[in-house]
Image (spheres, helix red, strand yellow):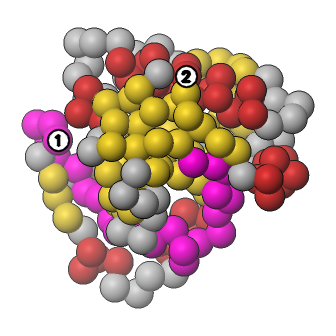
Amino acid sequence: MIVDIRKLTDFSSDHGELAERAVQKLICDNFKDLNPGVLTVGYDPTYDFSINNTLIELKFTTYNFQVTKVEVARADGRPSGLSLTKSDVYAFFSQDGQRTAKLRFIKTADLYAYYLTRQTLTHHHSPTSGDCAGRIELPLNMSNVNNLGAGVCDYDNGLFDLDTFRPDSYAVDNIHKYIQ
């Protein structure tokens, strides 16, 4: 499947749900002893799918791993994103090179700790206009937080070719540190 990041926020299509299902299958097919669980249907801000006993929030981004962003709340202060999730792990597909994207896992607890230890947190709020209320996104340099680079796929201008996914050998042996 080719995931087009521009279609992921079109809630009138099933592209987002198909992408979540494809990534769930990709993870289970490429790593040992992982079984697909619940896949949320429609808009569910608490998590996207489960594998074994782990709830996973999936994010696709055209940013590279050093300058990605994480939604933490609505612009009007209501909970959203990280402040609302019930996920155990965030799975990020982000641009890794000119023609590749990498799947990385970060424990949600590590994301909380990362943001809670930032002394200038309030200075990094950046409201966006993705919906009526907008959202607050904070910058994340994944090299500053524990993460597992699970593998890469081909990438071209917002298109993630999941059929070309190649798992990282280190991740194959260490996936269970992130997905129980």
Answer whether residue 91 is visible to the viewer in this image: yes
Q: Which residue was labeled with disc 1? A: 130
Q: What element carries label 1?
A: loop
Q: Residue 18 — which label?
A: none
* Residue drawn where x is 79% and y is 37% of the image: 31
Q: Horizontal and vertical percent for residue 122?
A: 28, 76
Of residues 17 and 71, the one nearer the viewer is 17
Instruction: Where is residue 57? Give x, y as percent.
Output: 53, 39
Left or right side of 47 for 157: left
**Quadrant of the snapshot with the C terminus:** top right
- Does dot 2 land on a helix, a strand or a loop? helix
Q: Which residues are the magenta region? A: 130-152
Which residue is painted at 24% across and 80% down in the image?
A: 123
Amino acid type at mark 2? Ala
Residue 123 part of the magenta segment: no
Whether residue 46 is visible here, answered yes or no, is no
132 up-or-down from 117: above or below: above
Q: Which of 81 and 160 is in front in this view?
A: 160
Question: The disc labelled 1 sits on which kind of residue?
Answer: Gly
Instruction: Answer with left or right where residue 161 lies relative to residue 146.
Output: left
Question: How far across and how far down the image is residue 112, in percent?
Answer: 54, 64
Look at the picture and state if 61 lies above or below 127. Answer: above
Q: Quadrant of residue 108?
A: bottom right
Query: Which residue position holds label 2?
Result: 22
Of the numbered discs 2 and 1, the one sitting upstream in the chain is 2
**Which of the pair 43/148 is nearer the observer?**
148
Q: Is residue 131 magenta?
A: yes
